[in-house]
Amino acid sequence: MSETAVAVEHHADHAHDHHGSEGFLSKYVFSTDHKMIAMQYLFTGMGMAVIGGFMAYVFRMQLAFPGISVPGFGQVSPGEYNALVTNHGSIMIFWVAMPVLIAAFGNYCIPLMIGADDMVFPRINRLSYQIFLLSAVILLLSLFVQGGGFGGAWTAYPPLSAVGDYNQTSLGASMWLVAVALEFVAFLLGGINFITTLMNSRAPGMKAYDIPLVCWMIVIASILFMLSVGPLIAGAVMLLFDQTIGTGFYDPARGGDPILWQHLFWFFGHPEVYVVLLPAIGITIDIIATFARKKVFGYKMMLYTTVATGVLSFFVWAHHQFLAGIDPRMANVFTVTTLLISIPIAELCFVIIATLYGGSIRLTTPMLWALAFMAEFLIGGVTGIFLGASGADIYFHDTYFVLAHFHYTFYPIAIIGTFAAFTYWFPKMFGKMMNDTLGKIHFWGTIIPFNVIFIPLFVLGMGGQHRRIYNYEHFPELAGEGMYQLRELATYALLVMLAFQLVFFYNCIASWMRGKKAGKNPWESNTLEWTTESPPPHGNWPEGLPNVYRGPYEYAHPDREQDYWPQNEPA
Amino acid sequence: MIDQASTYAADIDNIIIWVAVLAGFWFFVAEGVFFWLILKYRAKPGVKAQYLEGHENHVKKWVTWPHVGILAFDFVIIVMAIMVWYDVKQQLPEPDRTIRVIGQQWAWTFQHPGQDNQLDTDDDIFTVDELHVEVDQTYHFLLEATDVLHSFSIPVFRIKQDAIPGRTITGWFEATQTGEYDVQCAEICGIGHGVMAARVHIEDSDGHAAWVASAATAQ
Amino acid sequence: MAFPKPQATLRSATGIPTGRLAVWWLLASEVVIFGGVLGSYLMHRLGHPEWADAAIHTNTWIGATNTFVLLTSSFTAVLAHQAAERGDGKTAAKFLLFTIGGAFTFLGIKSYEWWYEISHGYTITSNGFWAFYYTAAGLHALHVIAGAIIMGIVAFDAWRNLELQRVELIGIYWHFVDVVWIFLFPLLYIAK
């Protein structure tokens, strides 16, 4: 019996078992369906994004108008300020970018795009989310324990993070660390699931080069994560012991070394940038191919380049530590590797740009987001060269230039990439079209303020303004009127940007309730998720899992009248 | 850009400007092509997109050649960065004077050599959050920390170096103009990180000698 | 309640069974965790020759005995796998029980060793060597405990001839736990 026949039989049972007969808990809370777990990750991540955004609002208000009582928060003390910036960073990277880009869209897309009915290990998938949720709860609780939340920056350099007398938030610091470690465990479990699913569960006929790039990217990101996070997990155990039972792993007075943590952290921390970047690139390239009606320019080239980026990313970590007291000769090595990584990254950007050539571009809302990702990410990439060049980094290290640089990478990744993916797959997830006009209002209301927030911060960084300082009045050169005007400009822009997010939430709810029905394939896309119903039922293809006959990007094929060619359509 | 008050400040600014030119060139080319393509290939009724694999040589060269260009520009940046880095961080010119800089939560202690110009002698002058240096003199600084990481940063000198408990890190600078400027802590060091400010007073040789003399009598 | 496996779990585009593939990836992630601990330890050990003075207080004979216990338990895990290949779930379960016994013997000896050392004043906070000693061996012991628990579940199923492929999987994991110890033993005990 062929596999497809088995699938038909299996799913006939499946659909019967699962529809209508499920209780609320088993359907929404303890579901093993990859789509429901994806939603859980997505909404948890969005909730955390709201919290992280609120933190940004509070400390930006404090920076622009030092000492005022921030509406909704009150006066910001130095300790609270440190806790806010620390947890804003931690949340946005570990509890927003990772769960939304990798876990939510990975969970949603991988089985649907490779033509499987679920992840290979649905229960491990559920466990992964539960551990993740626990980690988020622990992190949020840590903000309210005695002493307040951890305020030693998201990098948590010891001895500050290791010794309660120094950071004055010993309980908050330990809870922060436990939360981060649990989050890592959740993503290791999720990652193993993604990797094995992609390797083993592809639809019959789907060869390695027929897999949509977004799936490849998420899986390569999972592998990068898995291979880089181990040393930091070990390092976190050591830091936890330093905090709680008084070992001296990072205490120089007792034979330890504080720099060891920095190496362990950045050995993970730099690949981590690519862990979240790759899914966003994958999303972008898929959306651009769909709406430019173009085959991706050099699919294999893109894939090999990604692997090269991943490998190189393990050899650049010390560029975060040029001035950290490492041997200055080492900095030269890392300057070379860091600038070399600009080659594959530039290649990825060129491939995306070249895909537009000769296309038939439709500027829908998801397409706008995808194009904006490219345009903004380039700024992040180019400003990184200043920091990778060791000589220039002497000045820029730990200034707002660094801050603006990585927000120009992480914001396109985590926010723009997410909006691109969300607006693109919304019809599949909820079966309704989103309102395009509201979508475009939200787009421009987000992109323009975003640039107005961070371009002034580049200028402040060039003016020598250092990071993580709650109030610049003690530094005469930084307390000038011009500096304050720039800070105020950034803060006002942030307020505008946050206000425009209400449009997004309104659009989501209104479209979900009263939107136009989406149908199976509203974007006329090729990939497999558009061949089933919207939203797909548990088991994904009630009438049998699809077979695959061609690659995912056969748009505008000269032999066909229609300008798209779904992967599952027999030749 | 802010004042350049050390011998190597101009070198560091120079490389920043060069990176801006070299990277900025590619940035504007890439963004320009990007927006041009978006405008040129907007969907038109009845016009189908082209079918390109991306392996054809006549299109591939548009990706390959910029690559070679970027590699060349990278090479230039690497060479410049390492030259500046070597000058600022890797080599130590003979000092005219040596000071010690100690970071602790949340203040800087500066140990000046006093009238005998020798560090660690009885006439050393200790100050808190106030560093006095003489213009046109080569200084070595011995950087230490007593509790957590700090980072000794003087933006007008373009110097920055993390201070690590348990280690002494030696660096150098030479001021080129007199004045009074900020010293910052550039590594988060706890609740008082935001108040860990100091000032550097750059004096001409008479002014510096007068300060040393007055500090000596005050002790 | 038996969990209905999705089609995805039963497919094998690579030709490697999904469970085995996943275990290998799990081990890959474990390798870097232990790599982080041991790499840090090695860097520190090379930088602190005086740690040898602490290391002479570890008991090489106890370490060697435990090495022997673990290797033996790995051997019975192999026998369990062979029995499972034949479809003989009961024999597989019995051999797994031997392996679990090895795990408990290992943990018993380890507890005695630690009790002895702690009662002589060599605790985790004594100095850097002891901190790494207890952390690395403790992390390994956690893996032994986890392995023993999972093996118990696998043996319970195997006894009823269910999920026999898992006997091989837990065996792979157990060999890994063994290999980690093979690295720990010389680094913590033999290098004086």
Image (cartoon, rainbow, N blue to C red):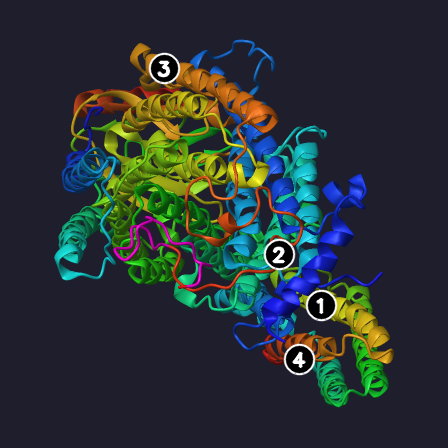
Chain to which the residue tagged by mark 4 belongs:
C
Residue at (56%, 56%) from the top-left corner?
A111
Q: Nearer the viewer, mark 2 or mark 3?
A: 2
Left or right of B42 in this view: A38:
right
Q: Is residue A73 above or below residue A535?
A: above
The residue type indicated by label 2 comes to: Glu
Q: Same chain for labels 2 and 4? Say yes or no.
A: no
The residue type indicated by label 4 comes to: His
Q: Which residue is mark 2?
A: A543
Q: Nearer the viewer, mark 2 or mark 1?
A: 2
Mark sitting earlier along the chain (2/3): 3
**Label at residue A469:** none
| Location of residue A384 by image quarter | top left
| Location of residue A489 by image quarter | top left
Q: Which residue is mark 3?
A: A489
Label 2: state its secondary structure: loop
The residue type indicated by label 3 comes to: Leu
Residue B47 or A109: which is nearer the viewer?
B47
Q: Which residue is mark 4?
A: C175
Residue A165 or A133: which is nearer the viewer?
A133
Q: Which residue is mark 1?
A: C143
Q: Could you tell me how far apart the alpha carbons at marks 4 and 3 are, in whole angstroms?
A: 60 Å
Q: Is residue A161 above or below residue C40?
A: above
Q: Same chain for labels 1 and 4? Say yes or no.
A: yes
Q: Is residue C179 above or below residue B36?
A: below
Q: Main secondary structure of the magenta part?
A: loop
Mark 2, other Cα within 10 Å: few <14 / some 14–19 / many ≥20: some
Q: Is residue A564 magenta?
A: yes
Q: Could you tell me how far apart the alpha carbons at marks 2 and 1 are, in whole angstroms?
A: 44 Å
Q: Could you tell me how far apart the alpha carbons at marks 2 and 3 are, in whole angstroms?
A: 56 Å
Left or right of B127 in this view: B59:
left
Q: Which residues are magenta?
A: A553-570
